[in-house]
């Protein structure tokens, strides 16, 4: 069971603001899904390796060559919040 | 106005008139749409068609109109994942598939509606409102690529691209009575596809015929260095377009006809399998014992990957930004206001499943179950050439019927998600009707054996007329 307090904590970890009224509703809906997930407990996975990827692609390397990249103004074109060629955000600390 | 036709028919029309005229007639049809399948139409479509005419472009899709799901990046054309958080975002680059389509001469008509961030089975969670099923506008078109399927079924475009993380191409193809392919993981570059669950998803084509699917695959599939999971392997998909299933061995997983299956769907699919027998194929029952656990494993993995992939939408570099006097507050408010309920639920559950104390219980457990599901496929597909069953357990449901109960919506994906966990290819083809709504037959193949499922699907089409049926108002 996920509690209201846990919902608020997870919301903070995920940077999604959740007010007290919402956390009740989230807890209820999330718990019905978590209950369903609980059925995996009945599967014996002793000695079963996890599958992160279905293809046996391990590391993919490319030559370390200098290539042209996107112009700075193009990268910044999708925001109004910019200053001197950088993204501008509120203070982080 | 253009009549419902396939790519070959369109090319003929272009030869008789022009790409510009054909594009104009499709745009007119979209203007009078009754399905709300497009989020954006491209204001340069006519200009592009005109240039194709004047340059005498002779690519395999020269002048052919196509629609693109709103989570595939298109340079200069708004791409929002049908979410408020990406409102106004215009990608500065093309996805690999878009580069390929443009080079082949295709004319992009616009971006199609979807469940927000591809998280859904009904296209109801879009910020731009629900897309309607052209067969019955009280019903959902399926999802998450509901727009891409509905516009093809409504004759507003001959073909489209969608993406399939857990059935998002095959489900709407089945619900709207069109053909949809989820290729083998690694076949089509994901460069420029806005990630939801990157270890599961593939871009896939939707069209009115299997031959068109092969034509599209010949254009968009192939190796791309910018996707580290792209597989370098040559294939000619159109070679598969042969009417021949003599000796084909079909496996029918009993688990795909489990609890909750609609009687009409069940009968329609068994009739299709009987048809294959008439055509010279043979079938046998196979067992995929871990199918019942695939859904839970799929959702845990998809949500976990989503919680990480969607971290980039924080209001800093693009899209919607809420006010806040420090970055954390700004980001938390941006995400609270910018994401819809289902996206937030999945991010929260994914964050929870990966958090200290729960990682092993949920995420690691799901990855181990994924191994067992994949082994089911390896074993079954060592005994038979293809697997067949219903794409969806029911016909399209009513709008509003399931949207308030997330779990009931998840359960609709029971036959499609195992395929993504295993990474194998799968196609949905129209195989008849139940409750006056289209039913999809799902044909699953071995890794990189798209040609066998395309051949099986094409042969079925040649020997039946289900795919020629049109919804009334667009006949």
Image (cartoon, coloured by chain):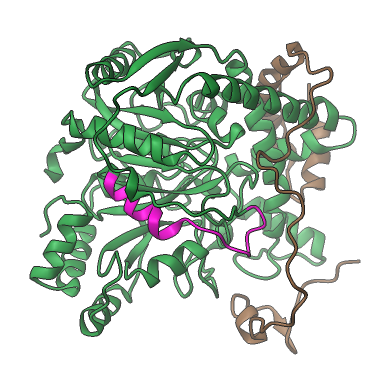
Chain colours: A brown, B green
> Where's residue B149, x and y in %?
34, 44
Examine the image and state in which quarter residue A46 appears.
top right
Q: Which residues are magenta?
A: B211-229
| Residue at x-position 59% and y-position 25% | B378
- Viewer-nearest residue: B180 or B251: B251
> Where's residue A47, x and y in %?
84, 20
Inspect the magenta stretch and tell me whether residue B220 lies in it. Answer: yes
Examine the image and state in which quarter residue A10 appears.
top right
> Where's residue B158, x and y in %?
25, 54
- Viewer-nearest residue: B432 or A20: B432
Q: Is residue B141 visible to the viewer in this orientation of the structure?
A: no
User: Where the C terminus of chain B falls, by quadrant?
Assistant: top left
Q: Is residue B53 visible to the viewer in this orientation of the structure?
A: yes
User: Where the N terminus of chain B falls, by quadrant?
Assistant: bottom left
| Residue at x-position 61% and y-position 52% | B195
Reply above or below: B162 against B402: below
Is B232 situated left or right of B349 in this image? left
> Where's residue B415, x and y in %?
48, 24
Reply above or below: B240 against B270: below
Reply above or below: B284 against B357: above
Inspect the magenta stretch and tell me whether residue A47 lies in it. Answer: no
| Residue at x-position 54% and y-position 68% | B89
């Amino acid at each position: 069971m996920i509690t209201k307090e846990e919902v608020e904590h997870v919301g903070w970890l995920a940077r999604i603001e959740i007010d007290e009224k919402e956390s009740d509703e989230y807890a209820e809906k999330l718990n019905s899904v978590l209950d369903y997930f609980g059925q995996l407990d009945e599967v014996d996975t002793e000695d079963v390796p996890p599958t992160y990827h279905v293809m046996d692609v391990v590391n993919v390397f490319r030559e370390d060559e200098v290539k042209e990249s996107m112009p700075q103004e193009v990268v910044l074109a999708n925001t109004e919040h910019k200053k001197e060629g950088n993204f501008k955000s509120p203070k982080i600390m | 106005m253009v009549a419902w036709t396939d790519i070959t028919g369109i090319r003929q029309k272009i030869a008789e008139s022009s790409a510009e005229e054909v594009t104009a007639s499709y745009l007119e049809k979209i203007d009078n749409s009754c399905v709300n399948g497009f989020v954006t139409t491209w204001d340069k479509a006519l200009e592009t068609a005109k240039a194709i005419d004047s340059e005498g472009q002779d690519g395999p899709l020269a002048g052919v109109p196509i629609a693109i799901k709103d989570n595939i990046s298109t340079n200069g054309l708004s791409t929002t994942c049908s979410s408020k958080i990406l409102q106004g975002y215009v990608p500065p680059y093309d996805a690999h598939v878009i580069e390929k389509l443009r080079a082949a001469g295709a004319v992009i008509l616009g971006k199609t509606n979807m469940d927000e961030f591809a998280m859904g089975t009904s296209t109801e969670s879009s910020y731009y409102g629900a897309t309607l099923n052209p067969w019955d506008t009280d019903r959902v078109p399926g999802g998450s690529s509901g727009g891409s399927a509905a516009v093809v079924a409504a004759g507003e475009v001959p073909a489209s691209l969608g993406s399939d993380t857990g059935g998002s191409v095959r489900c709407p193809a089945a619900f709207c009575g069109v053909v949809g392919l989820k290729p083998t993981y690694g076949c089509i570059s994901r460069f420029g596809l806005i990630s939801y669950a990157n270890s599961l998803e593939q871009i896939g084509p939707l069209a009115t015929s299997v031959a068109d699917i092969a034509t599209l695959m010949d254009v968009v599939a192939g190796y791309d260095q910018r996707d580290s999971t792209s597989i370098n392997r040559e294939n000619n998909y159109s070679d598969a377009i042969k009417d021949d299933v003599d000796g084909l061995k079909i496996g029918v997983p009993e688990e795909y006809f489990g609890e909750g299956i609609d009687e009409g769907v069940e009968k329609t699919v068994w009739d299709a399998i009987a048809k294959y027998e008439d055509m010279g194929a043979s079938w046998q029952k196979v067992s995929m014992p871990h199918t019942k656990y695939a859904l839970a494993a799929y959702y845990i993995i998809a949500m976990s990957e989503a919680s990480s992939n969607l971290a980039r939408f924080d209001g800093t570099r693009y899209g919607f930004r809420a006010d806040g006097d420090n970055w954390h507050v700004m980001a938390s408010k941006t995400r609270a206001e910018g994401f819809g309920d289902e996206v937030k639920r999945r991010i929260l559950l994914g964050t929870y499943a990966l958090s200290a104390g729960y990682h092993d219980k949920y995420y690691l457990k799901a990855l181990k179950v994924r191994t067992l599901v994949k082994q089911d496929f390896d074993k079954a597909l060592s005994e038979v050439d293809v697997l067949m069953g219903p794409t969806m357990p029911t016909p399209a449901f009513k709008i509003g019927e399931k949207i308030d109960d997330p779990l009931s919506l998840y359960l609709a994906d029971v036959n499609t998600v195992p395929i993504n966990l295993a990474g194998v290819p799968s196609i949905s083809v129209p195989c008849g009707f139940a409750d006056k709504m289209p039913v999809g037959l799902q044909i699953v193949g071995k890794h990189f054996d798209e040609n066998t499922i395309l051949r099986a699907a094409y042969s079925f089409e040649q020997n039946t007329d289900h795919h020629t049926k049109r919804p009334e108002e667009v006949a």
